[in-house]
């Protein structure tokens, strides 16, 4: 069902609105995650791609991202450029601690078929739909009308000096990560513990996949799949250092009308360092 | 750091004294003084030997030495050698490449660290005096770790065990493979 919705112009919209729908993966990949010195620059790639981390599909617009400094101040993205398959940008780290680079969006979405059997998607590519707009834009008696609350979050973290977490509180919106292990303090051979929250509640049953960089050089993609326990927790451990892509997905029927379901995704790129 | 190094003392002595009778007497006395200084240092020191490498572009490695407990937690920073005289602390950019030390200590430290930070060393043996450095350390089993990371080169860590306080003479050596030739820990029980 998910795949069948992927037709024509809606494909791209779905790519950005819901990584649930297909094989495309979205990621913000920093060149490195832990740096030293009084200040330092880190350069980023951001893309919607098939590969981890091989940009081959669509450049994610960097202007949709926000950067927050360790003390919670907004930080400007610099040297931004949208290339064919990826956007690139730099962040200058001048404060000691952890910077968060992210996008978070929530929307009401609807899928339906018209009289000719043609499929439709609302609110359209990269747009956010509200309840009022929904009643105006979507035919309420359409066939196969499927209305959902969606929330998508895309994150990565980079640190100058020692990792900090002061700028990273749960907002209670969408699927969020409480990093019991700081993403910039992940090392080979040590447990890495994460906890997921959906709209502020422990997200039991969150489905998680983790894929290591260099996917194209492996015969088997080699992703690790797991499901969060009743506390919304997962525990990871890696033998190989490298950059990792984590995608978590959550779905339930505790939506508010007119939505019947809520669906959320969370993506994190983090580096596992060797000792 | 340099001031703690016994091989630096004679140089310091020469430079700081005018050429007087006193200084001549001093110069006579100096070798004896050096000897006793050397013997004291000999009693408690960490020797780090860096290999001479036949490579096209050689940069002296960044080196860190520290005392850690059995669980790996850093207890005392002994030394960190890096490019201390680059403008605007630019040399700190590569401290993270001492990645074990960086996690255990460096990332939480404010550089430079008094009595710990020092300039990089050329190939050969350098000695670091340890007199009094572990006096406040609770009794227990520890490791002295040494980590070296070289630009356009590799990285290596070595460690030697030590039980504190020292009850009998310690003379423990660990051999390296590529970035460190060897490390040697020499300690005597406190008098």
Image: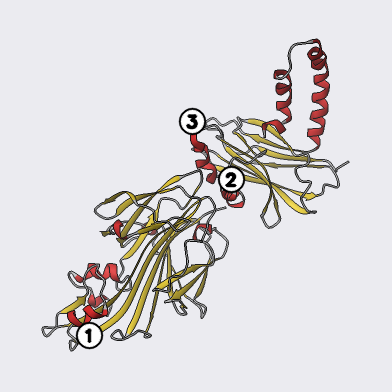
Q: Chain of mark 2?
A: B
Residue in front for this viewpoint, A183 or B177: A183
- Quarter holding residue A188: bottom right
- Quarter holding residue B38: top right
Mark 3, mark 2: which one is toward the viewer?
2
Of callouts 3 and 2, the N-terminal one: 3
Which image quadrant: the N terminus of chain A? bottom left
Q: Position of residue A127 (x, y in %)?
A: 24, 69
In the picture as drawn, the residue positioned furthest to the right comes out as B191
In the picture as drawn, the residue positioned furthest to the left comes out as A116
Left or right? Give the position of A185 relative to A109.
Answer: right
> Element at badge 3?
loop
Q: Position of residue B73 (x, y in %)?
A: 66, 55
Labels 3 and 2 positioned on one and the same chain: yes
Q: Chain of mark 3?
A: B
Left or right? Give the position of A171 relative to A16.
Answer: right
Can residue A214 be seen here? The reply is: no
Residue holding disc 2? B110
Residue holding disc 3? B57
**Residue at left 73%, top 14%?**
B18
Labels 2 and 1 positioned on one and the same chain: no
- Quarter holding residue B157: top right
Q: Residues within 10 Å of mark 3 (few under 14, many from 20)?
A: few
Residue in front for this viewpoint, A268 or A62: A62
Residue holding disc 1? A145
Q: Are marks 1 and 3 in contact (CB under 8 Å)?
A: no
C-alpha distance separating marks 2 and 1 = 60 Å
For residue B161, above or below residue A127: above
Q: Position of residue A65 (x, y in %)?
A: 34, 59
Q: Chain of mark 1?
A: A
Labels 1 and 3 positioned on one and the same chain: no
């Amino acid at each position: 069902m998910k795949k069948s919705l992927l037709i024509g112009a809606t494909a791209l919209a779905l790519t950005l609105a819901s990584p649930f729908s297909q094989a495309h993966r979205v990621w913000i990949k920093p060149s490195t995650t832990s740096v030293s010195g009084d200040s330092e620059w880190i350069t980023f790639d951001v893309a919607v791609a098939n590969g981890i981390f091989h940009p081959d599909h669509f450049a994610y617009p960097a202007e949709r991202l926000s950067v927050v400094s360790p003390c919670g101040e907004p930080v400007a993205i610099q040297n931004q450029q949208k290339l064919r398959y990826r956007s690139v940008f730099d962040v200058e780290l001048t404060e000691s601690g952890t910077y968060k680079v992210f996008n978070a969006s929530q929307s009401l979405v609807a899928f339906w078929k018209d009289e000719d059997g043609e499929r439709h998607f609302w609110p359209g590519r990269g747009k956010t739909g509200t309840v009022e707009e929904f009643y105006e834009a979507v035919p309420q008696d359409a066939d196969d009308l499927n209305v959902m609350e969606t929330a998508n979050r895309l994150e990565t973290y980079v640190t100058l000096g020692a990792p900090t977490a002061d700028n990273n509180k749960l907002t209670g919106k969408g699927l969020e990560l409480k990093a019991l292990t700081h993403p910039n303090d992940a090392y080979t051979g040590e447990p890495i513990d994460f906890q997921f929250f959906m709209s502020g509640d422990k997200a039991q049953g969150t489905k998680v996949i983790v894929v290591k960089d260099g996917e194209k050089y492996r015969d088997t993609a080699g992703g690790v799949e797991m499901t969060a326990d009743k506390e919304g927790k997962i525990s990871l451990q890696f033998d190989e250092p490298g950059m990792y892509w984590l995608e978590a997905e959550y779905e339930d029927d505790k939506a508010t009308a007119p939505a019947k379901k809520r669906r959320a995704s969370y993506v994190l790129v983090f580096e596992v360092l060797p000792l | 750091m340099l001031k703690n190094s016994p091989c630096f003392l004679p140089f310091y002595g020469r430079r700081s004294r005018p050429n007087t009778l006193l200084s001549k007497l001093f110069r006579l006395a100096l070798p004896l003084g050096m000897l006793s200084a050397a013997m004291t240092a000999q009693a408690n020191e960490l020797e780090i030997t860096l290999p001479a490498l036949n490579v096209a572009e050689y940069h002296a490695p960044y080196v860190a030495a520290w005392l850690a407990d059995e669980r790996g937690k850093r207890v005392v920073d002994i030394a960190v050698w890096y490019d201390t005289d680059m403008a605007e602390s630019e040399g700190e950019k590569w401290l993270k490449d001492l990645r074990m030390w960086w996690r255990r200590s460096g990332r939480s430290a404010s550089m430079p660290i008094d009595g710990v930070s020092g300039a990089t060393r050329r190939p050969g043996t350098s000695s670091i005096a340890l007199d009094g450095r572990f006096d406040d350390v609770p009794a227990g089993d520890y490791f002295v770790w040494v980590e070296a990371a070289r630009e356009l080169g590799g990285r290596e860590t070595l460690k030697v065990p030590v039980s504190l306080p020292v009850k009998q003479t310690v003379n423990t050596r660990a051999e390296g493979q590529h970035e460190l030739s060897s490390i040697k820990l020499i300690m005597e029980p406190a008098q």
